[in-house]
Amino acid sequence: MNDVNPSNENQAENKSEMKQEETNEENPSQKISIQMKKISLKQTVKKKNFLTMSLINQANQMIKKMKKNLFQNKKHQMKKKLNLKKKKMNKINLNKMKTKKNHQNKMNKNQKHQMKKKIQKTMLLNLMNNVQMIRSLMKINDKKFLILFLKKKIMNSNSKKKKKQKMKKLLNQKIQLKNKKIIMIR
């Protein structure tokens, strides 16, 4: 059905050309109108081509914008993920630091408690020794000697108190230094 003889087509074209020539020879006004139609057809084709090109350009620009937006959205999402990871890491680090601080505070408290216990033990031992010495002196019944001995013990006890205070100060200084070092490390 679709197959058409080329000879038939040529004959039809020749007939149309013949008719146009006849009309052209008859009326010059018709000739001008035909030329105008041809020009208008060309212009409409050009306009259509221009419109299609502009539509294609607009479509391309829209695609580029969409791609840009997608890329920016991906970047934004990646930044968000990184920030969330950083926040999580900071929280973990803060928790670690808190646990370290708590552990160090416990250690310091334990050290202080142990030092207090040691001091108390030494005090008790000294007292026991003093009591034994006093008992032995009481057997001698020399009151002057006993008074002198007691005076010496009182003096010694005062010096021991001073020593204890010095020891406490030293301990506190050591603890403060350790805390400063920890802060400097951070």
Image (spheres, helix red, strand yellow):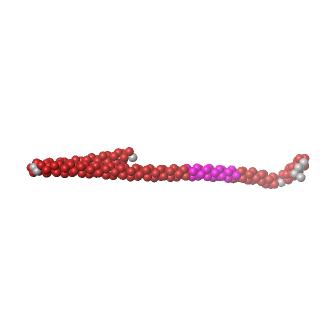
Residue 62 is a magenta residue: yes
Residue at image x 87%, y 51%?
Answer: 2
Is 106 part of what is drawn in magenta? no
Q: Main secondary structure of the magenta part?
A: helix
In this rendering, position of residue 2 left or right of residue 136: right
Residue 21 in the image: x percent, y percent?
85, 50
- For the residue pair 99 and 4, the one nearer the viewer reads as 99
Identify which residue is drawn at 34% across, 51% down.
110
Near-viewer residue (100 or 12):
100
Q: Is residue 72 left or right of residue 101?
A: right
Q: Residue furthest front?
A: 139
* Residue 113: percent from left, percent from top: 31, 52
Q: Is residue 183 visible?
A: yes
Residue 9 relative to residue 36: left or right: right
- In this rendering, does residue 101 appear at all? no
Q: Residue at x 38, y 52 (%)?
A: 102
Q: Position of residue 5 (x, y in %)?
A: 90, 48
- Identified at 21% across, 51% down, the residue is 127
Q: Nearer the viewer, residue 153 or 20?
A: 153
Task: Read off the magenta span.
Answer: 52-75
Residue 41 lies, in percent from the top left, at 76, 53
Q: Looking at the image, how many numbered discs can be counted on the residues?
A: 0
